[in-house]
Image: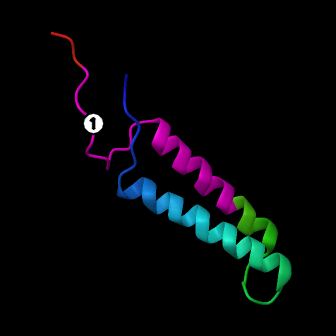
């Protein structure tokens, strides 16, 4: 069974999701803190979350915890 792991690229995507989600929540309460609309901030946050999940479920090329699964 393949192990799922995140490399630096996956963690960068997770950080983007967390930061953009926090900015979205702040934008709901204080309208002038963030230059972009709340809708587009949420859209980009969702895309970052989907990217993080895809890198976790797939094989993140920057993760170095994988071993070759070859049968001899």
| Residue 9 lies in quadrant | bottom left
Query: Residue 46: x and y, percent?
Result: 68, 55
Q: Residue 56 magenta-drawn?
A: yes
Left or right relative to 67: residue 55: right
SS label for mark 1: loop
| Residue 59 lies in quadrant | top left
Tell me how many marks there are: 1
Left or right relative to 24: residue 9: left
Q: Is 2 drawn above or below residue 52 in the view shown?
A: above
Which image quarter is the C terminus in?
top left
Left or right relative to 37: residue 48: left
Query: Residue 55: x and y, percent?
Result: 47, 44
Q: Residue at x 52, y 41 (%)?
A: 54
Query: Residue 5: x and y, percent?
Result: 39, 43
Q: Residue at x 21, y 11 (%)?
A: 71
Q: Residue 24 magenta-drawn?
A: no
Q: Residue at x 75, y 66 (%)?
A: 40
Residue position marked by numbered label 1 in the rendering = 66
Instruction: Tell me where the magenta segment starts and ends, as one range.
Output: 44-69
Q: Is 3 drawn above or below residue 60 in the view shown?
A: above
Q: Is 26 drawn above or below residue 18 in the view shown?
A: below
Seen as rendered, the residue at the extreme left is 72
Left or right relative to 34: residue 72: left
Which image quarter is the N terminus in?
top left
């Amino acid at each position: 069974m393949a192990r799922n792991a995140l490399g630096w690229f996956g963690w960068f995507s997770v950080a983007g999701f967390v930061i953009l989600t926090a900015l979205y929540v702040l934008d709901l309460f204080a309208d002038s803190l963030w230059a972009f609309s709340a809708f587009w901030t949420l859209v980009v946050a969702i895309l970052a979350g989907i990217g993080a999940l895809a890198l976790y479920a797939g094989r993140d090329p920057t993760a170095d915890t994988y071993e070759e699964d070859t049968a001899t």
